[in-house]
Amino acid sequence: MNTLFPLLAVCIWTGNTLVTKSAATAIAPAAIAFYRWVLAGAILTPFVARAVWRKRAVVARHWPKLALLGALGMATYQGLAYEAARTTTAINMGVIVATMPLMSALLAALAVRERPTRATIGGALLSLAGVIVLAAQGAPGRLLHGGLHPGDALMVVAVASNAVYGVLLKRWALPLSTWEQLYVQIGFGVLCLAPFWWCAPAAPVTAANLPLVLYAGTAASIGAPFCWMNGIKRIGPARAAVFMNLLPLLVALGAWGLLGERLHGYHAAGGALVLAGLLWSQRRPRLH
């Protein structure tokens, strides 16, 4: 039963990837990114605000770190993802997002100055080859002729920013509960997104885009973190991370069935390379 928590979190994130792609034609990227976190913060306020106020001295002492975490995890990651959805497919986005655990492992090794294992390096290179095959649509020659989707590059930057977020979050170990940290980070994320929302063309919430905003601001911003945190608590981060390998498959099926995106051979080839790299990177050296 404990494995249901990370599985549900991945399913919610799958839905969020599809919502992100759908939002590309329904609402401006800066607008949905801003509305999403405003809604999530408003929902959490009755439950978390009082505890955060009691720890305002702790928040004031660590506000630079909390601000950076909010800028990376809330503003940069999701803001770039919404922008990327304009020029790439949900399938590509799902495969690139699935490389996040591997990016986190590499960044964590650099942060603590630990030498990465051969499996980690080999898995990273194999996954990178998969992303290249996917972004180049099975024709690596496109790399030399500028025929790539700009959204794929934006997604790589977005995923890298979220990987940095995860590494810093674990390394700093701030003296706040998970929900308190999330709440404060949401506040800083909203502050970072506000200027972009203000300067962007008007994009009010309408009957057409309201379901997208609601899903992003509730299930993806509150439900998924809750399930993921409980999954890590019950089965550990290493076992929970393996469930991220399901994301490309679930997104591909959802994009094909719900968004009408076509599946091609290069999707299978690129996805297989990414998955193989992720599995390889999970290998641990044998003890002698």
Image (spheres, helix red, strand yellow):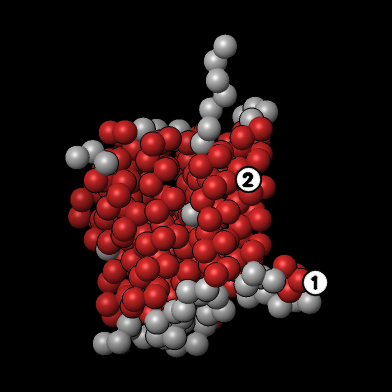
Q: Quadrant of the N terminus?
A: top left
Name the residue at 27% across, 71% down. 214
Q: Is residue 130 left or right of residue 45?
A: right
Which of these two is toward me, 21 or 62?
21
Query: What's the amino acid at mark 2?
Result: Ala
Instruction: Give the x, y percent position of residue 23.
Output: 41, 79
Q: Is residue 153 above or below residue 31?
A: above
Identify the secondary structure beneath mark 2. Answer: helix
Name the residue at 53% across, 80% down. 86
Instruction: Give the alpha-carbon distance from disc 2 to disc 1, as whole Å.
Output: 22 Å
Query: What's the amino acid at mark 1?
Result: Leu
Instruction: Give the x, y percent position of residue 244.
Output: 42, 50
Rendering quarter of residue 239: top left
Q: Quadrant of the C terminus?
A: top right
Rendering quarter of residue 18: bottom left
Which of these two is toward me, 39 or 187?
39
Instruction: Find out whether the residues at labels 2 and 1 contact each other: C-beta distance under 8 Å.
Output: no
Q: How many marks?
A: 2
The residue labelled by disc 1 is 144
Q: Is residue 202 left or right of residue 178?
A: right
Instruction: Give the x, y percent position of residue 225.
Output: 33, 50
First-in-chain label (2 vs 1): 2
Rendering quarter of residue 209: bottom left
The residue labelled by disc 2 is 124
Name the residue at 27% across, 61% down. 219
Work out whether residue 207 can be spotted. yes
Q: Using a 10 Å C-alpha cutoff, classify the residue at mark 2 as few (fewer than 14 neighbours), some (14 to 19) or many (20 or more).
A: many
Work out whether residue 160 can be spotted. no
Identify the secondary structure beneath mark 1. Answer: helix
Residue at the top extreme of this rendering = 288
